[in-house]
Amino acid sequence: MAVDFYHLTASPLERVLPQICDRLLSGGERLLIVADDPLLDQLDVQLWRYARDAFLPHGRSNGASPEAQPILLSAGAEPLNQADNIAIADGRWRDEALDFARTFYFFGAAQLDEARMSWRALKAGKEIELRYWKQDERGKWVQGP
């Protein structure tokens, strides 16, 4: 089980998350994106507009056929689409993420204290591979200490 902490400093979630979605889909994987409803609405639009000539196929957990969606947007952490990956998009840690093979945990300055508490709790708990990612001055993601 791996948890990737993404500290959003230079790029907003709406630009970072679709890139990860695209990479996972290219590898044949599925993703559950969890957040509160107002943010899910924004992400829903952004995934449709991801690229000029493409979109990222996705749906909502309360929509038609959630089990068929390669990317599923949901307020809850239940993998109705049989995803092995979860993205916590609103910066609020959910322990259900530990049931997935890989977790992408996005947080900004407003959630920094909660992210630190989550890091410490996960480090002290069961064996989990923790990685911290931050952007350098050029906006490139680099793995931190």
Image (cartoon, rainbow, N blue to C red):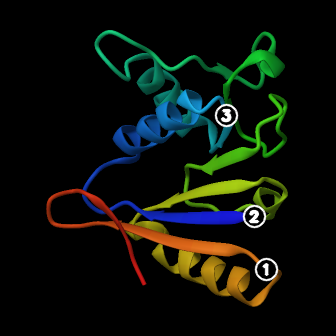
Please identify the quadrant where the C terminus is shown: bottom left
Please identify the quadrant where the N terminus is shown: bottom right
Q: How far separated are the C-alphas under marks 3 and 1?
A: 23 Å
In the picture, measured across the screen, residue 99 lies left or right of residue 5, that is right
Kind of residue at disc 3: Glu
Q: Earlier in the sequence, mark 1 or mark 2?
A: 2
Q: Is residue 141 above or below residue 74?
A: below
Q: Position of residue 112 (x, y in %)?
A: 46, 75
Graded by Cα atoms within 10 Å as few (under 14), some (14 to 19) or many (20 or more), the crowding at tag 2 reads some
In the picture, measured across the screen, residue 76 lies left or right of residue 42, that is right
Q: Position of residue 103 (x, y in %)?
A: 66, 56
The label shown at residue 10 is none
Q: Secondary structure at mark 3?
A: loop
Residue beneath label 2, please?
1
Residue beneath label 1, please?
127
At x 55% / y 60%, what residue is drawn?
91
Kind of residue at disc 1: Glu
Q: Are marks 3 and 2 in contact (CB under 8 Å)?
A: no
Q: Are marks 3 and 1 in contact (CB under 8 Å)?
A: no
Q: Secondary structure at mark 1?
A: loop
Q: Are marks 1 and 2 in contact (CB under 8 Å)?
A: yes
Kind of residue at disc 2: Met
Q: Nearer the viewer, residue 115 or 141?
A: 141
Residue beneath label 3, please?
29
At x 79% / y 80%, what residue is drawn?
127
Q: How far separated are the C-alphas under marks 1 and 2?
A: 8 Å
